[in-house]
Image (spheres, rainbow, N blue to C red):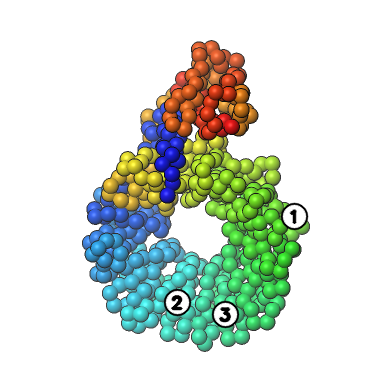
């Protein structure tokens, strides 16, 4: 639970950071109250045939698949698959999940009254939403998992009376078959990944524990690519498959060298340990969150010396480098990589907490975008490019950034005094940003944010690019900026919301100002510069 003082400060900052017209430029609107008895928990949004399909629940039907065209009238339950529901709240229902588009169909897992958890398919209509095949007869269910598109069909793992094995489906009962009975007990296939018309995955057989396998969809074309673990009987458990150029890369347990980065062209000879990041110990670096940017593979990895930090490597393993030791005192644990305006954005934790970061691939060009929560983690999630901004959820609130600290802004409001609006599941659809959130007493419901271009106020010419130094400051705060028109005014507000300083007319006509701060109490302050319809904010600390 956050301290009351922290909540007050964040509330003040959120209001103070809003430039003129921002609430008009981006408008948040409730799409539909799906559950009038509490939260509906919309999740797993996927675009299918120019509609949004997702899971949501209410007291009457429990969790079921829903479909929307973005309007209230066009948002409806796709099909009531299960009559089972939790009358005490949202729960029960068919609990659909893993929505996956393959060909012109949408596959997902769901549970109805008599078949247990099985594979379902839809064409986007109620009549066209149906059980594909009851491959584990009765109410137990085959529990389909790791659904992935593969050459216009679906490949997945399921238990169809022969244990958990790889399956393939074209959406019909006749066209749904076990590809191969790999292990007499269960192969436990996972991580299906299509590469040059072949699906690669992790599986175990009667001889080897979990290793790299491949399939072309036929029994004959399904076999182990290579045993990647040098230690007898141990699993390599390949995961995180990511393509870069003519190879795909993944994390696997090499045995003697632990978990490291592998590369493969799909053949036995062409599948090998690519680079060893951790040479300090035998445990390996366990590279995670593999992401390709500017023909280099980025990941979170632990070299055994610096903790879990941001690394990158090109097609040549000798190009391996730690981009930056973001947290010299521990792990920065970078993740949620997203490209915006030609740069790579991600979340990471330095000594001040987990915040939004950006890199151009160099140490010098890697820095925090904004310290949203100066007391700890804001933990940015769901990084999503919408229009010319990067949107994300931080502390459960909706934010956007243009890449600058002063351009990082929280939008929406907290009308019922919550610490969080529980913003999740951001997706761009039909020129709007859709998400789940709570903005009033109706609970977590289905919302959208769109750009209201007709109400954007005209902007005066010239950019301010306000800067302050030193930061933290002691006796004097130096302010510098470009020379915008009309001449700007300046004010400083403390963490109680009280304005403690205002500039006089003409103070900033030359773009510089020295402000005495010796009398200021120690703590966080916001400096706001206003010029016509433009506004910029810079945070600084008095020590």
Which residue is tagged 2?
A: 158
In this view, 498 is above or below 331: above
Which residue is tagged 3?
A: 204
Q: Mark number for residue 131?
A: none
- Decide which of 419, 386 is in the foreground and name it: 419
Instruction: Tell me which numbered mark, 2 or 1, is placed earlier along the sequence.
Output: 2
The residue at the far right in this view is 318
Residues at marks 2 and 1, CA–CA distance in whole angstroms: 40 Å
Instruction: Tell me which numbered mark, 1 or 3, is placed earlier along the sequence.
Output: 3
Q: Quadrant of residue 468?
A: top right
Which residue is tagged 1?
A: 319
- Decide which of 179, 418 is in the foreground and name it: 418
Quadrant of image for the C terminus: top right
| Dot 1 crowding, Cα within 10 Å, few <14, some 14–19, many 20+ | few
Residues at marks 3 and 2, CA–CA distance in whole angstroms: 14 Å
Q: Can residue 375 be seen?
A: yes
Which structural element holds mark 3? loop
- Decide which of 452, 221 is in the foreground and name it: 452
């Amino acid at each position: 639970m956050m301290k009351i003082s922290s909540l007050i400060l964040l509330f003040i900052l959120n209001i103070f950071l809003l430039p003129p017209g921002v609430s008009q430029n981006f408008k948040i609107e409730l799409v539909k109250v799906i559950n009038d008895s509490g939260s509906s928990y919309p999740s797993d949004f996927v675009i299918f045939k120019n509609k949004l399909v997702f899971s949501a629940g209410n007291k009457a039907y429990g969790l079921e698949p829903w479909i929307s065209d973005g309007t209230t009238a066009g948002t409806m339950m796709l099909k009531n698959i299960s009559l089972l529901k939790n009358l005490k709240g949202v729960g029960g229902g068919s609990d659909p999940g893993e929505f996956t588009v393959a060909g012109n169909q949408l596959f997902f897992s769901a549970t109805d009254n008599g078949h247990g958890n099985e594979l379902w398919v839809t064409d986007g209509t109620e009549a066209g939403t149906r059980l594909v095949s009851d491959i584990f007869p009765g109410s137990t269910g085959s529990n389909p998992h790791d659904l992935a598109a593969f050459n216009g069909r679906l490949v997945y793992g399921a238990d169809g009376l022969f244990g958990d094995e790889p399956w393939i489906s074209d959406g019909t009962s006749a066209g749904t078959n076990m590809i191969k009975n790999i292990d007499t007990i269960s192969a436990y296939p996972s991580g299906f990944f299509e590469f040059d018309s072949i699906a690669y995955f992790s599986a175990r057989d009667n001889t080897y524990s979990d290793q790299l396998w491949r399939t072309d969809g036929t029994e004959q074309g399904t076999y182990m690519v290579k045993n990647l673990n040098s230690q007898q009987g141990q699993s390599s458990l390949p995961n995180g498959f990511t393509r870069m150029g003519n190879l795909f890369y993944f994390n696997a347990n090499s045995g003697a060298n632990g978990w490291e980065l592998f590369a493969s062209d799909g053949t036995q000879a062409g599948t090998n340990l690519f680079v060893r990041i951790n040479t300090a110990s035998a445990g390996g670096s366990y590279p995670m969150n593999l992401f390709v940017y500017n023909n280099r593979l980025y990941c979170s990895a632990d070299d055994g010396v610096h903790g879990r930090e941001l690394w990158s490597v090109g097609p040549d393993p000798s190009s391996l480098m730690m981009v930056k030791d973001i947290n010299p005192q521990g792990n920065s644990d970078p993740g949620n990589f997203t490209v915006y305006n030609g740069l790579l954005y991600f979340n990471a934790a330095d000594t001040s907490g987990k915040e939004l970061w950006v890199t151009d691939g160099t140490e010098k060009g890697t820095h925090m975008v904004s310290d949203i929560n100066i007391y700890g983690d804001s933990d940015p999630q769901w990084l999503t490019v919408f229009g010319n901004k990067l949107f994300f959820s931080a502390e459960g609130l909706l934010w956007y950034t243009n890449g600058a600290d002063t351009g990082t802004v929280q939008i929406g409001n907290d009308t019922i005094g919550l610490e969080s609006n529980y913003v999740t599941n951001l997706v761009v659809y039909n020129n709007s940003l859709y998400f789940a959130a709570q903005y009033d007493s109706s609970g977590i419901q289905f919302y959208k944010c769109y750009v209201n271009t007709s109400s954007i106020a005209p902007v005066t010419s010239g950019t301010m690019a306000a800067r302050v130094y030193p930061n933290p400051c002691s006796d004097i705060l130096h302010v510098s900026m470009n020379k915008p028109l009309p001449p700007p005014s300046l004010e400083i507000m403390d963490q109680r919301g009280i304005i403690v300083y205002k500039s006089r007319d003409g103070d900033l006509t030359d773009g510089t100002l020295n402000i005495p701060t010796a009398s200021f109490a120690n703590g966080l302050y916001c400096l706001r510069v206003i010029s016509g319809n433009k506004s910029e904010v810079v945070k600084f600390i008095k020590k």
